[in-house]
Amino acid sequence: MLARTKKYATWLQCTIPALLGASAFLVQIYAHAMPNKPQYLSAQESDPVKLRWMQGFPPPKDKQLRFADGSFFEFPAMRWSVVHMRDFMPTVNVSRGLLAPSTLSYQPDPKIDAIRFRPLHTKQDITWQDSLAQNYTDGIIVLHQGHIVYERYLGALTPDKQHAAMSVTKSLTGTLAAILVAEGKLDDKKLVIDYIPELKSSAFADATVRQVLDMTTALQFSEDYANPKAEIWSYSAAGNPLPKPQGYKGAIGYYQALETVKKLGKHGEAFGYKTPNADLAGWLVARASGQSVNQLLSERIWSKLGMEQDSYYSVDELGVPFAGGGFNAGLRDMARFGELIRNHGVWQGKQIIPAQAVEEIAAGGSKTAFVKGDHPELTNWSYRDMWWHKGNAHGAFTARGVHGQTIYIDPTAEMVIVRFASHPVAANSANDATSLPAYEALADYLMNIKK
C-alpha cells in the first residue's frame, strides 16, 4: 500500500478528479509511485467485505477511508470505494424518473462459467469463471438477444448499489453528443467556438466538434505525473471539488480549465486519448441542449428505459458534472443502456434515441488516425463518438474505463456485456489480455448453442 505522506496526500488532492476518469493518467501514477512492479493481494485476499472497510460507528481507525488524503482510492481500499463514491464526493443526480422498472427476462446459462479460452500472450487456457477473479470483477452481466444469461456480484457490489464507471462515462457523453448531432442541434462540422466562444484563445479555437468527439485534437497536454510541470497537474487542481489552498491562482472548475489548454500540432491527424476532450464534449452537449449533462441523460435515456436506480455524477466545486469519468450506476441499468445501443436506439419496441446516432457510433472512426495514437496493442481499432471500435468481423465496439469497467457490444452475436471491476492496476492493458479473448469466446459460444 502506498505510504500516505503529507506530500503524497497533497498530490492526490490535486489529482483525484482526473484519476477517476483517465486511463492514461493512472499508468503514470503507478509508474511514478511504484517503480518496482508491486505484488498485489489477490481478488479473494482483497475482498472488501471481508476486510470490513468503513464498518462500525465509527469504523476503527485502520478501516477508515478519506477523500482528502487519497486513502479512499488506494488498493485494496478502492475495492470498497468504487461502490461508495457518493460517500466521499459531491455529486449530482441522474433521475430514473417515475416509470416502473422494466422487466429483464432471465435465461441463465450455467455452462458459461466453464467456457475455456486462451488469454493473449499465453499458452494455457483458463475458464470464464477463472477470469473473473484474475480481473478483480465486482459485477458482470451478459445479455443475449435481450435476455440475461449470466449475472454475478462480487466484492462490495450488490444489485441495489451503484459502481463507478470511470471512463465509460466518456461513451455516455459521446452518445448524448451523437443524439444531438443526429437531431441537428449540434453540427459536428462546425468549430467548437461556434458554440463556446469562451475557448477562442485555447487549443480548441480551430478544432471542429467532430475532432473533439473522436479525440483527434492536437493538444499540448501531458498526463505524465512524473513531470511536475505536466499540464495535468493544473487541470486536475481546477476540477478538484475540495477548497483551493490559500494563494491558489489557477482555474476554477473544468470549463475554466479548458480555456487554458494549448495546441500542439494539427487537429484531425492523430488520435490522442485525453480527458479534456470529454469534458469539452460535455460542455458542448450542455451548450447545444440548454441542459446539464446529468439532466439531459435523465431526460433522454435514464427516465425512458425503466431503470431500477437513479445514477449520479461527481462534480467540480461549481457543480459541473465530470463528463470524462464521474458517472456511477447500477449493473443492470448499464446493461439496459447497452441493450438500447445494440438495438439501434430501440427499447422494448419504442425508438428512444435516433437510430442514426447509434449507427454513427457503431461504424467506428478513422483507423489511420488511431494507428498514430499511443495504443499499438489495439490492432485495427478505431474511436468514434468516444466509443472504442474493435474492428473485428463481428463489428464489436466498447466503452472502456480504468480498473476494468466495460460495456462490450457484439452486434453479430446479439450480445451485451457490462462489467464493473476494481483491478489494482488502472490501465486496461492489465486486463485486456484476459478480457478481450473471453468476450470473443463467449460470443462464439452464444452464437453456436442450440436453441
Image: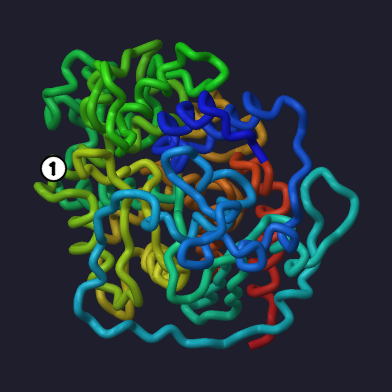
Q: Residue at x 47, y 51 (%)?
A: 399
Question: Number of callouts in the render?
Answer: 1
Above or below for 264 versus 174:
above
Q: Residue at x 38, y 18 (%)?
A: 219
Q: Is residue 58 visible?
A: yes
Above or below for 185 versus 303:
above
Q: Position of residue 402 (x, y in %)?
A: 54, 45
Q: Position of residue 37 (x, y in %)?
A: 76, 33
Q: Residue at x 51, y 67 (%)?
A: 56
| Viewer-side residue, 444 vs 79 | 79
| Viewer-side residue, 174 vs 79 | 79
Above or below for 328 versus 228:
below
Query: Residue type at mark 1?
Result: Ala
Q: How is the image coloured?
A: rainbow
Report helix, strand or loop for mark 1: helix
Q: Position of residue 443 (x, y in %)?
A: 64, 66
| Viewer-side residue, 73 vs 281 | 73
Q: With 40 as the anchor, is 262 left or right in this view? A: left
**Considering the image in quadrants, where does the N terminus appear?**
top right
The residue indicated by pointer 1 is 288
Q: Position of residue 396 (x, y in %)?
A: 54, 55
> Mark 1: few, some, or many residues within 10 Å (few <14, many ≥20)?
some
| Viewer-side residue, 148 vs 351 | 148
**Considering the image in quadrants, where does the C terminus appear?**
bottom right
Q: Residue at x 19, y 79 (%)?
A: 98
Q: With 440 as the anchor, is 88 left or right in this view? A: left
Q: Is residue 351 visible?
A: no
Residue placed furthest toward the right? 123
